[in-house]
Amino acid sequence: MRGNGKMQLLRIHYQKLFLCVSFVMLVLVFVKVWEAGDEPRGMRQTLQGSVKGQDKREAGAKENSINIDSPVLPPIRHGGHESSKTNVFADLFQDLTREDTCPICFGYDLCEDVAAGFLTLATDSPQVVGGASMYSAHLGDMQKLSVKIPTGSSFSRLDESICVNASLGSGCSVSSATRHSYLGKAQPLSLQILHHLLKIVGTPRNQYPLLMCPSKKLLGIMEQSFDDNDDRFLSHPERIMLYTTLAIAPDIVILKILTKANLNVGFPRLVGVCGRAEVLEGELTPLASMLDESFNVRASLAAQILTMVDDFMEDDPEWYLFYGSWSLDKMAINKEGEVVLTDLAGMAIVDKNLFRDEYEDGTESRTQEVCNKECFQKFTSEVYREGHDTDEICSRVEDVGHLMYAAVCAMILSDMKQHKYVDYFTSSASQQHQPRTTKGLLHNIPASDRATVEELVAECVDETAPGGRLQAAQELRDFLSDFLLDEEDDDKDEDGEELDGKDEDEDDYDDDYDYGEEEG
């Protein structure tokens, strides 16, 4: 009987224990459900940017060459830290994007990745490059990217004008004021709208090359570049973002146009945008850091730049790219070893339909007379003059376009003393006491080739006969292209076998020089 009593007592204790555990489990489930109902702050902020849903995401994926639709990865392990931690700059990134100002912004195709912590800042200390703050960033734990934030007062001026025009007072919410302002009107892109926006943000027309030779076709492709879902119609937010981007960051518009036209002619990949932040491919090595490489390497880079100029003029049957801001500090080398321009704000896109018909069938030469610095500056003074005849002046772009070769040869390639003061795109008065202090890319030319290279460079800078610059630039490009091949041949003996110092069981030598890649 005592045994039966003890067993009954144990069953009672177990029943009480089971009831206690069940109660605790119910409480935990209730707490989890309650917490799930509270959205994270970052996700709430992206609701407005996610209105377009899957259509916008798919359009963004087609435009970007880097896949951003991967699942969120584990927290990034930052260099120098022993433990894995979440991105400590998440709040800073949200503040920089200013997504709350949209559609007075560049767009929001990357905002979900920022909010989810998939696209993260790697530092809170930016570099100031060309009027913008550049932050290092990561895509997951693999890709290195750059986040570009405009500096200056352009955005504050635009915001203020919208608030005033909407009669909402200074410091209003620009996202709410947009529909009540001049930007709220349903109107296609026109030169009048663009000139008005440039006046508001304080950008002189002669400092806005994208308008050098405007045409209806060019304005049309600008609009198409912001048609994210390819429905051939710009929604009101898309149109406002187009206006904003043209006024503040025309380089984004240029990158979108070139990407849609499949023109890969020397520019960094645009990964996407979020609010007032632009995200570009990273791992770019400044061209200036290559000045101490061997001459063979520098010669091959110079050949790439000359090829880039040729591609700008000839690569596309519809569009002629004219770049007027050539300098060593605006060029870099990507991880594939390709030279790219890092500042496209100085790019003009010209409709080839504006050119003279005679050029198309080859019955008239493009180079009718010698054209050097004075010739070019006369042209630019006319093309930027208010009220000029666009069709007449822009039909002559090909007459002076070859001066891009002259600018490259004088300001990037040449190390000759007489070219230290030359700047084809700035008045001589402002440059006469400001010589270029950096070495030219083609310094320390091998003695056996110095005379040939310097003669071609001199003719490239200042042609002495009609067509002399084009011929010199092409000969120089071909001559320099051989140097990298010579360097590869130096690694082999006369019989074509590898030199000593490499074991037979090692892998074959990789003759593709990977510029800018860090070892290890």
Image (cartoon, helix red, strand yellow):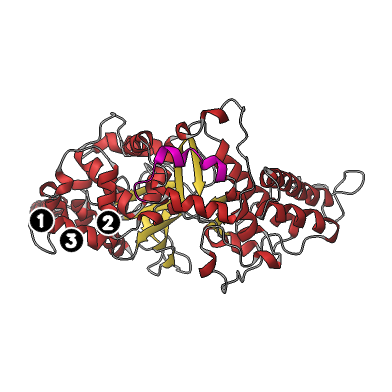
Look at the numbered disc 1 and give the secondary structure of its residue: helix
Q: Name the residue under label 1.
A: 20
What separation in Å lies between label 1 and label 3 (alpha carbons)?
Answer: 62 Å
Identify the secondary structure beneath mark 3.
helix
Residue at numbered disc 2: 199
Of callouts 1 and 3, the N-terminal one: 1
Does residue 305 appear left or right of residue 275 in this picture? right
Residue 343 position within the rendered picture, expressed as x and y whole percent measured from the top left: 47, 55
Residue 71 position within the rendered picture, expressed as x and y whole percent measured from the top left: 36, 44
CB under 8 Å between callouts 3 and 2? no
Mark with earlier residue (3, 2): 3
Q: Amino acid type of disc 1? A: Cys
Give the residue at x 35% y 60%.
149
Residue mark closest to the camera, 3 vs 2: 2
Q: In this view, does 290 lie above or below 49?
A: below
Q: Name the residue under label 3.
A: 160
Mark 1 vs mark 3: in front: 3
Is residue 227 toward the left or the right of residue 131 in the image? left
- What x and y, as percent, mark residue 237? 21, 42
Magenta range: 386-400
Left or right of 353, for residue 174? left
Residue pushed farthest right? 495
